[in-house]
Amino acid sequence: MVTTGYVSAAPVPVKTPEAKTVSDAKKREQNRQRLLAKAKKRVAAAPPAPEQKRQEMALRLAERARNRERLAMHARWMPGSLGRSEALWRDVQDDAAIATRRTQKSVSKLRTVIHRLESQLGKPYLWGGNSPSDGFDCSGLVFYAFNDVLDRKLPRTANGMFQDNTLKPVHQEKLRRGDLVFFNINQRPGADHVGVYLGDGRFIEAPRTGLTIRISQLSDNFWQSHYLGARRVL
C-alpha cells in the first residue's frame, strides 16, 4: 500500500499596512539625513558673513597688539637682518613714539591743572562755589582745575569723584602730582572732602567756611585719620 502525501510550501510573507508604514518612515528619515548633510556642506562652503569677518579681523588685531607688547618688553632688542625683524622693530618704535606723545600730552595737561590750582591759593572757601570770581568748595576747585583739559568731565561732588569707576585707584605710597586724595570727615558714608596731591606729601584744598584755599600736609595726623583713598585722573 502506497501512502501519498504532500510537502507544504513556506508561507509567503505578506506586508501588513503597519510594516509598510515603518518602512516608509525609515526611507523618509534616511532621505532627511542626506539632505541635512548636503545643507551642512553648503553652509561650511559659504563665504563668511560680514559680522564674522569683523570678528576675525578684531581677533587678528588683538593678537598683533599682544605681539607688540611682547616685543616692547625687550627694551634692548636691536633690529637684525633676519626677514621681518626690521619691520617688527619699526612697529615697536611706532608704539613707543605714540606712548611718548601721550605722556607729553598728559604732562602738558597736568601743568595746566597745577597752575590753575595754585593761582587760586588764598581765595575764600564758598560752599557750592566753582569759579575764581566767587570762590570754591573742595570739589568745585577740583572741577574747575581739571575739566577744561579733560575729554570727559569729572563729577561735581567729592563722593561722585571717589565713586567714579573710570578713575584709577592709587595706593597712598604711589601718589604722584595731580592725583585726587579723598577724606571722610563728617563720619557719613563716602567721601566728603577732596584735594589734589602736589608731591612731597603736600596737597591743595579748599577746606571749609571761614578758611581760604591752602596747601596742607597729607602726613598730618588729622588727614591720616580721615584718609579714604586716591584716584588718578591724568
Image (tube, rainbow, N blue to C red):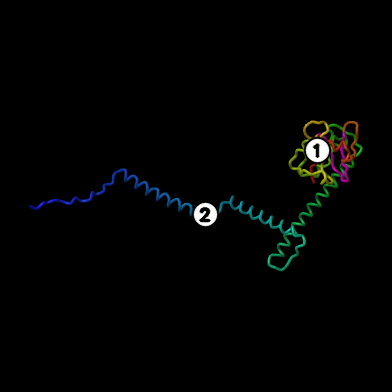
Task: Inspect the image, locate mark 1, and give the three-letter code of the amino acid beneath it.
Answer: Leu
> In the image, 197: left or right of 52?
right
* In this view, 36 is above or below 186: below
Q: Tell me if I can see residue 191 in this picture.
A: yes
Q: Position of residue 106 (x, y in %)?
A: 81, 49
Mark sitting earlier along the chain (2/1): 2
The outermost residue toward the bottom is 81
> In the image, 72: left or right of 58?
right
Q: Position of residue 138 (x, y in %)?
A: 84, 36
Contact flag, marks 2 and 1 (Cβ < 8 Å): no
Q: Main secondary structure of the magenta part?
A: strand
Q: Residue at x 74, y 41 (%)?
A: 165
Q: Residue at x 61, y 51 (%)?
A: 55
C-alpha distance separating marks 2 and 1: 58 Å
Q: Position of residue 203 (x, y in %)?
A: 87, 41
Pointer 1 residue: 228
Pointer 2 residue: 46
Q: Which residues are magenta?
A: 192-207
In terms of image quadrants, where is residue 75? bottom right
Q: Residues within 10 Å of mark 2 (few under 14, many from 20)?
A: few
- Total marks drawn? 2
In terms of image quadrants, where is residue 194? top right
| Residue 211 or residue 11, whichever sits in front | 11
Q: Residue at x 13, y 51 (%)?
A: 5
Helix, strand or loop at disc 2?
Answer: loop
